[in-house]
Amino acid sequence: MGLITDYKPYESFLASGHAFFEAPGVMSSMEFDDAVVVYKRYVNSQLHDEAMGFKLNDLGACVRKLDVEGARALFKEIVSAALV
């Protein structure tokens, strides 16, 4: 299998998201943005969920701007949707 299917993108997304919100900064935002991109690729290629892909795209934009509150709201929405 490929990197996306062997790797656990959701777990990495959760862990890096929590790390970003605990200590927002350049390094944590870069790690979280990378995890968002990998999870977005997984969502688009394996789950075929375009709506979630767009939300993840918006989340990545917030993270890159260090918009912590905007990112937090999207993160909660995405995690809630993934649990359904």
Image (cartoon, grey):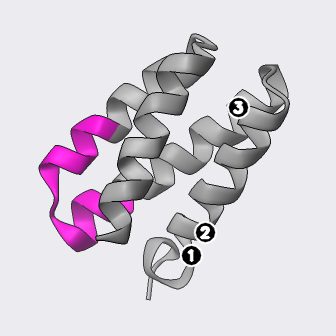
Residue topped by disc 3: 30
Residue 12 covered by magenta stretch = no
Q: Is residue 68 left or right of residue 83?
A: right
- x then y, percent, for residue 42: 36, 64
Q: Is residue 18 left or right of residue 72?
A: right
Give the mark nearest the N terminus, 3 or 2: 2
Whole-Å distance between the Cαs marked 2 and 1? 6 Å
Identify the residue shown where x is 41% and y is 34%.
Answer: 74
- x then y, percent, for residue 82: 35, 64
Q: Is residue 63 above or below residue 6?
A: above
Q: Is residue 10 above or below residue 68?
A: below
Residue topped by disc 1: 8
- Please state which of residues 35 and 62 is positioned toward the viewer in this rendering: 62
Q: Is residue 6 left or right of residue 82?
A: right
Mark 2: secondary structure: helix
Please identify the quarter of the rendering in which residue 22 is found.
top right
